[in-house]
Amino acid sequence: MKALINEPVTKDLSRNTVRNALCVIRGIFNEAIEDGIVEANPAARLGRFTRIAKIAEVKGISLTRAEPGQFLQAAKEICPEYHPLFLMALRAGLRRGELVAVQWGDLQFGKDEQDANRFIDVQRNYVRREHTTTKSKKSRRVDLSQELRRVLIELRDRRLLEAFLEVRTTSPTSSCSHRRTGRFWILTTSTTATFSQCSPSPGSGRSGSRI
């Protein structure tokens, strides 16, 4: 059993990969014990042997205090249509799929900017071209900052005007959707490239969700 564990370790596989493989082996022997084939599980209590496995060296780096402002300013100049998306990602810390799934009905703007009853009701995720539950399978409320509130209200009013001018009958309150595609946030391969262009440190792998 030790030799079996040592094989993936010598291949420079990560510690989590080795642990996952060990869990499968442990489960097989547990089934064998229940069936009366073996009396003990040789894969039990072998966690100490995985400590020599490779530990992932790449870790996310949070943005500095100055970088979010620099990034959002660059977004306004380079891709203003994506600015509300990036602002919501930074200020609300939503996951990519949650950003796509946001609907206008999920936004509580409050009576005015001073009203503390402002939030985003995160209820859905968008993964593999279908709407699902959030990762935790529970809805949650996320604070809606004054700045994000102003930007989203401006966006809502602009979409209302566009719909009126195009003599559209669909209401923008039904979903936070782009008027041509049915989704407001257009997340494609070009979005990643746009993010890199606006990023203070392109390709650095920094994360804005932990600001």
Image (cartoon, rainbow, N blue to C red):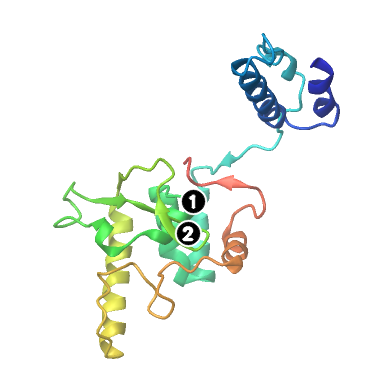
How crowded is the residue under tag 2: few (<14 C-alpha within 10 Å), some, or many (20+)? Answer: many
Residue sitting nearer the eye, 210 or 179: 179
- Which residue is disc 2 drawn over? 72
Residue sitting nearer the eye, 197 or 99: 99
Say which amino acid is labelled 2: Leu
Give the structural element (helix, strand or loop) at label 2: helix
Give the structural element (helix, strand or loop) at label 1: helix
Calculate the distance from the C-alpha at mark 1 to the C-alpha at mark 2: 6 Å
Quadrant of res 12: top right
Which mark is on residue 125? none
Circle 1/circle 2 CB separation < 8 Å: yes
Looking at the image, can residue 144 be seen? no
- Seen in the picture, residue 55 relative to 147 is either above or below; the reply is above
Residue sitting nearer the eye, 195 or 49: 49
- Quarter of the image with the N terminus is top right
Q: Residue at x 66, y 48 (%)?
A: 204
Say which amino acid is labelled 1: Pro
Q: Estimate the x, y position of residue 103 in percent, counting from the top left.
A: 32, 62
Q: Residue at x 52, y 65 (%)?
A: 187
Q: Estimate the x, y position of residue 29 in percent, counting from the top left.
A: 67, 20
Q: Estimate the x, y position of residue 72 in percent, counting from the top left.
A: 47, 59
Question: Looking at the image, which residue sits at the far top?
Answer: 39
- Seen in the picture, residue 108 relative to 189 is either above or below; the reply is above
Residue 181 is left or right of residue 155, and the answer is: right
Q: Estimate the x, y position of residue 30 in percent, counting from the top left.
A: 62, 19
- Which residue is disc 1 drawn over? 68
Q: Residue at x 56, y 67 (%)?
A: 188
Q: Residue at x 36, y 59 (%)?
A: 102
Residue 25 is left or right of residue 137, and the answer is: right
